[in-house]
Image (cartoon, rainbow, N blue to C red):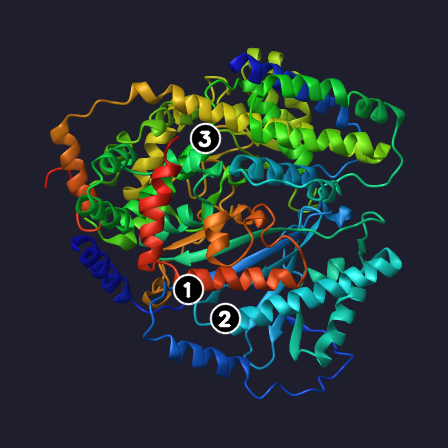
């Protein structure tokens, strides 16, 4: 009985959460209207999007739901734009966008990521289901248009594609706008990769949500028997105590755990610890193997930075989230204490110095990679001799990795005082400390490879050391307004969303076999799945969810 | 157990050096292999038609003879990995791959070899990680009971105060 009373109290607490608005991830560079060839001939249906959204918001006022925003990215992974691969002036720059005509709401934009075409939607708040629906509909229409074009003529220019999208206005009233970068690609070809081309999306979603939902939400999405549980288990604060509590089978005591894991601070510790765990390489990996890992990533996936290893990537600095919680006390000490009660985590502090990621440098004028072969004389002789065969091609491709920087000669100093390797030795400690006490980060002078500290207002994983400040890890550095905070402190890129697991899928009425394929097919199923995710998030946190996740799922997941 | 992982690592790395000379969509291969590995780990059966659907990373461009000779090594590769990874879910997947290999054309034979190789690499890496986690279990730091209770009490109200001196 006490347990149910506790659940009721929890339920009531959730109801008192503030209502929300949303953070914009806007990158508008230049907007211009392309002369339209077809005028919209159809009027909107009687019940318009705006009307639907308003009605839905009103009807949900008294219902339980989590306040959130969700945005989607759909990257077609067959490399339709091979010519774009090494041109950094085009990479990830928005090309054109689609805006809903009635609500004037931006729905999505197109970017090129490596050699792939990618649809990036706006974030949609929990009150904007009809707008999300319209967004996914138009993505599918636009993509199907491209697919049809490529099935008839094997290649089409961007302009050819956008002209065809414009023709869709007869069915969907929208506005297509063009960014400055569009002019550099309008005559470039989108190329069908092979006669048996089967389009496939690599999806990602970004969710803004309150930190108190972080632990149950991500265990719910990825639990409870998946490989992700290895890292999740190693990142759960007080994991060992939680498992001991299972043995007691005392529901009253167990309720305290649900309360504890529902603390914003513990959600933050979990997300922070998970980032550290996933950035830490296996203890038996040698420098040669770490360099090969970077080389393989570069040649196979054209990416070398830290986020590749992350299941969940925070778009906000951990330090910003910490500030938003307004707790009292010492974060570094608290982090270490609650994580000392997690056995699988215990080697992370001593292994983190070997974290392996890299930056690829480009010539700002040509957009081509910039060779860094002049780094060789600054690296220790043994390291160069042993790894010459991988080092040279990496440096020629403008790739500088943390494994290389750890091996800089001792004469290369940080602030002209200590060797750069010492920076890595205290990297873990600084990554914890700077969440509460941000002070400085480090930049490298690429002429003499000396390292200088500079004042910095965020933790040093936002972005990780030596990565570009525009890197997506911890990119949203501006303070949130109170209105923006209403959807929560956390903005998390769920990089492994296609691998959502059976508990979530069953909740949505989807087949468990869909794991690994969620949101990957550009077909009408995609819309169903996107809306399922939206509805799941909207209802998330119901007492039944809490019971299933904490009582049944997590104890099983934590067996590692 | 570690020796098995190391041997598998060498086997796979050697094979990768061969494939690097060819034109396949490695990014897609990696995605498909991750999907298979993830499903195997979660105990989700992957039917034969799904495996075949996941072979789109290799297109119908000309295949060099050397590349086909790699496909011909499939059976010895299969024998090695199934002898070394004694995991029922993985073996079931490997068996399906072998069935496809036996029934299909040269292009599919090569694709199935590449897929099984990549899935093995990923799956054994996760097995290795799980093994490592089991190993560190006995070395749990032995916090005092009073300290543990203190941490738990702070943990319960962490949004208000996380100071150790409450």
Report helix, strand or loop for mark 2. Answer: helix
Quadrant of the image for the C terminus of chain B? top left
Sort mark 2 into few (<14), some (14-19) or many (20+) by Cα contacts within 10 Å: many
Q: Secondary structure at mark 3?
A: strand
Q: How much space separates mark 3 and mark 2, taking CA atoms?
A: 48 Å
Q: Earlier in the sequence, mark 3 or mark 2?
A: 2
Chain of the residue where label 3 is placed in the rendered structure: A
Asked if residue A419 shows in the view, the reply is no
On what subunit does the disc labeled 2 rest?
A
- Residue at the image position 53 percent from the left and 32 percent from the top: A357
> Which of the 4 image quadrants contains residue A186?
bottom right
* Mark identifier at residue A451: 3
Q: Residues within 10 Å of mark 3 (few under 14, many from 20)?
A: many
As drawn, is B120 to the left or to the right of B63? left
- Residue A549 versus residue A181: which sits nearer the camera? A549
In contact (CB < 8 Å): disc 1 and disc 2: yes
Determine which residue is flagged by label 2.
A129
The answer to whether the residue labelled 3 contacts the one labelled 1, judged by CB atoms less than 8 Å apart, is no
Q: Quadrant of residue A165?
A: bottom right
The residues bearing labels 1 and 2 have C-alpha atoms spaced at a distance of: 10 Å
Image location (x, y in percent) of residue A467: 50, 39
Return the disc, 3 or 1, that comes first in the chain's sequence: 3
The vertical placement of A86 against B6, above or below, is: below
Q: Which residue is mark 1?
A: A538
- Residue A18 against residue A305 in the figure, above or below: below
| Image position, residue B77 (x, y; %) | 71, 20
Would you place residue A242 above or below residue A265 in this image?
A: above
Location of residue B118 (image quadrant): top right
Q: Earlier in the sequence, mark 1 or mark 2?
A: 2
């Amino acid at each position: 009985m006490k347990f149910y009373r506790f659940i009721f109290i929890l339920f009531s607490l959730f109801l008192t959460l503030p209502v929300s608005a949303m953070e914009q991830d806007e990158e508008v560079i230049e907007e211009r209207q392309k002369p339209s060839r077809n005028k919209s001939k159809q009027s909107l249906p009687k019940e318009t999007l705006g009307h639907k959204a308003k009605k839905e918001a009103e009807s949900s006022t008294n219902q339980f739901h989590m306040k959130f925003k969700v945005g989607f990215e759909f990257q077609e992974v067959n490399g339709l734009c091979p010519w774009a691969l090494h041109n950094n002036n085009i990479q990830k720059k928005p090309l054109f966008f689609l805006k809903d005509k009635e609500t004037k709401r931006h729905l999505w934009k197109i970017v090129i990521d490596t050699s792939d075409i990618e649809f990036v939607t706006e974030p949609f708040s929990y009150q904007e289901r009809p707008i999300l629906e319209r967004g996914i509909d138009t993505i599918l229409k636009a993509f199907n248009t491209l697919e049809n074009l490529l099935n008839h003529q094997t290649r089409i220019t961007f302009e050819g594609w956008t002209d065809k999208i414009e023709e869709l206005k007869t069915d969907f009233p929208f506005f297509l706008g063009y960014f400055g970068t569009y002019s550099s690609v309008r005559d470039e070809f989108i190329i069908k990769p092979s006669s048996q081309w089967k389009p496939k999306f690599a999806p990602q979603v970004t969710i803004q949500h309150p930190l108190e939902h972080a632990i149950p939400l991500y265990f719910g999405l990825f639990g409870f028997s998946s490989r992700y549980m290895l890292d999740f288990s190693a990142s759960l604060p007080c994991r060992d105590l939680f498992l001991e509590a299972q043995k007691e089978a005392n529901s009253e005591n167990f309720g305290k755990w649900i309360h504890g894991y529902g603390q914003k601070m513990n959600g933050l510790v979990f997300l922070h610890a998970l980032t550290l765990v996933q950035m830490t390489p296996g203890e038996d990996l040698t420098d040669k193997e770490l360099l090969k890992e970077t080389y393989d990533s570069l040649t196979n996936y054209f990416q070398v930075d830290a986020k590749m290893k992350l299941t969940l990537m925070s778009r906000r600095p951990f330090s910003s989230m910490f500030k938003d919680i307004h707790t009292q006390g010492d974060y570094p000490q608290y982090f270490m204490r609650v994580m000392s009660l997690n056995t699988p985590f215990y080697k992370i502090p001593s292994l983190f110095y070997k974290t392996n990621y890299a930056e690829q440098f480009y010539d700002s004028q040509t957009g081509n990679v910039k060779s860094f072969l002049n780094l060789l004389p600054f690296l220790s002789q043994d390291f160069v001799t042993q790894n010459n065969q991988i080092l040279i091609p990496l440096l020629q491709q403008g790739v500088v990795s943390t494994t290389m920087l750890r091996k800089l000669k001792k004469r290369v100093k940080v602030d002209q005082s200590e060797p750069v390797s010492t920076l890595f030795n205290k990297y873990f400690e600084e990554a914890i400390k700077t969440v509460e006490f941000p002070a400085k980060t480090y930049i490298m002078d690429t002429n003499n490879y000396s390292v200088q500290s500079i004042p910095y207002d965020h933790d040093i994983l936002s972005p990780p050391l030596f990565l570009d400040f525009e890197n997506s890890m911890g990119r949203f550095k501006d303070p949130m307004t109170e209105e923006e905070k209403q959807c929560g402190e956390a903005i998390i890129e769920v990089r492994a969303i296609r691998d959502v697991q059976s508990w979530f899928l069953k909740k949505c009425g989807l087949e468990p076999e869909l794991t690994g394929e969620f949101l990957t097919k550009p077909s009408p199923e995609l819309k169903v799945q996107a809306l399922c995710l939206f509805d799941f998030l909207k209802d998330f946190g119901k007492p039944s969810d809490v019971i299933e996740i904490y009582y049944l799922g997590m104890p099983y997941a934590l067996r590692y | 157990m570690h020796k098995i992982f190391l041997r598998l690592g060498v086997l796979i790395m050697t094979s990768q050096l061969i494939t690097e000379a060819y034109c396949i969509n490695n990014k897609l291969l990696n995605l498909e292999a991750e999907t298979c590995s993830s499903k195997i780990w979660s105990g989700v059966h992957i039917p034969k038609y799904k495996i075949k659907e996941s072979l789109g990373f290799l297109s119908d461009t000309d295949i060099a003879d050397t590349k086909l000779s790699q496909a011909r090594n499939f059976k010895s590769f299969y024998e090695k990995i199934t002898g070394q990874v004694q995991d029922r879910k993985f073996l079931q997947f490997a068996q399906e791959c072998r069935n496809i290999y036996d029934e299909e054309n040269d292009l599919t034979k090569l694709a199935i070899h590449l897929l099984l190789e990549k899935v093995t690499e990923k799956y054994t890496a996760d097995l290795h990680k799980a093994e490592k986690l089991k190993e560190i279990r006995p070395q749990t730091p032995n916090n005092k009971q009073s300290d543990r209770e203190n941490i738990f009490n702070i943990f319960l109200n962490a949004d208000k105060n996380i100071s150790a001196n409450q």
